[in-house]
Amino acid sequence: MKVTSKNPKILITGAGGFIGGHLVKHFLARGYRQIRAVDIKPLSDWHQLSEGVENQSLDLQNLDNCRQVVVGVDEVYNLAADMGGMGYIETHKALCMLNVLINTHLLLAARDAGVQRYFYASSACVYSQAKQKSANIKGLRESDAYPADPEDGYGWEKLFAERMCRHFMEDFGLEVRVARFHNVYGPQGEYQGGREKAPAAIIRKVLEAKSSGRHEIEIWGDGEQSRTFMYIDDCVKGIDMIMHSDIWEPINLGTSELVTINRLVSLVEEIAAIKLKRRYKLDAPKGVRGRSSDNTLLKKYLDWEPSISLHEGMKKTYEWIEGEMKKNAKGR
C-alpha cells in the first residue's frame, strides 16, 4: 500500500463513533503515532477512546473548526455523519442532509491546508432504488448509482458529497478516495436507542427474548428483504487499502454474502441456541427490497475483498452485546 510519508499525521473524523473508533485502533496497531481523532460527541460518550491519540470534541459543520483540525495533517479520513439504521434515516432526512456541511467545509479546509489524501465514507444508500426492488438482487455495480435515484435524504447527501469529492480532485488536485459502505456491523456499535442497524437490533431482541422468557421477536417488514453485512475488521482494512491505492472512482466496500432478514434472525437464534416466534411489523421502516455489493472492481484493483463470514462476525458481535447487556442489568 502507498503511504504519503514515513510517519504521516492523520485526522479521523467521526472518531467517537463505531467505525471511526475501530479505525483509530487499526492505525495504532499499524504503528501510526500521529493521530488526531475528532467527533462532535463529548469524549465521555465516544464508543472507544484511545490513549496516545489527540482526541478532540468539535462540531465539524463549522468551517473554522475544520480549518483548525486539518493543520499539519497529511491524510484525512472523513467518517463524520449524523446517521443510524433505517429507522433513523427514514425519520431524520433533514438532519442527514445537513451532513453535507461537514464534507463541504472539511474539503475546503483540506485543500487550503495542503492535505495530501482525503478519504470519504459514502454509503450503498446512493444506489438507484429502481435497481433494488428484488430480494434476489444481483450485486450492485458502482455504475448503478446513475441515473440518480438514491435513498431519500441520507442517500442524496452521500451522492452529492461524492460528486463534490470528485470535483475537488479534478479542479484542485486533492487526492480523494471514496468507498461505499455496505452495512457494517461488529462490537462497540450501537445496539439500542434507535440508531442501531439490523444485525445489532436483532441480536438485542433475541437476547431480550431469551432473558425475559417471552420467546418471540418483532421483525420489521416481512423478513424477506435481503442485504449483505460486512464485519468491522474487514471494513477498516478496506478503508486503509483503498486510501493508499490508485482507485480514484467511488468503489464498493462490502461482502457479497447475501442473506434475508429472516435468515439473519435464524443465524442469531442458532448462536443463542433458542427458537423464537416471529411477529412481523409490516408498517415499519424497511428500506429497499434487496441490496448487495458487486466486488468485481474491488478485486480488480486490490486483489482482495471482505472475507469474514457472517456467522463468525455475528458470533463475536453477539458475545459483545450479551456482555454489555449483562453489565447494564447489574448496574440497575
Image (cartoon, grey):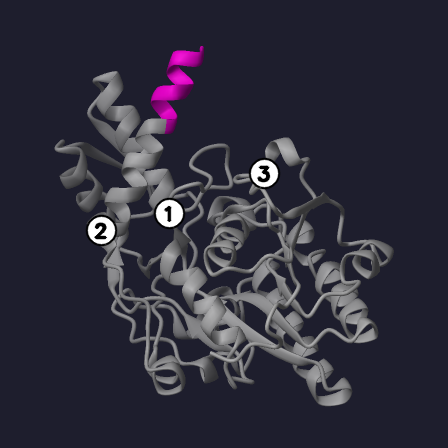
Above or below, comparing residue 213 to residue 321 in the picture: above
Instruction: Name the residue that disc number 2 marks.
Output: 312
Which residue occupies the extreme right position in the image? 64
Callout 1 secondary element: loop
Callout 2 secondary element: helix
**Mark 2 to mark 3 CA distance (whole Å):** 26 Å
> Which quarter of the figure has residue 159?
bottom right
**Mark 1 to mark 2 CA distance (whole Å):** 10 Å
Callout 3 secondary element: loop
Give the dominant element type of the magenta stretch: helix, strand or loop: helix
Instruction: Name the residue that disc number 3 marks.
Output: 46
Task: Find the magenta span and give its range.
Answer: 324-332
Residue 325 colored magenta? Answer: yes
Kind of residue at badge 2: Glu
Nearer to me, 52 or 206: 52
Above or below, comparing residue 74 to residue 262 in the picture: below
Instruction: Name the residue that disc number 1 marks.
Output: 186
Residue 9 relative to residue 316: left or right = right
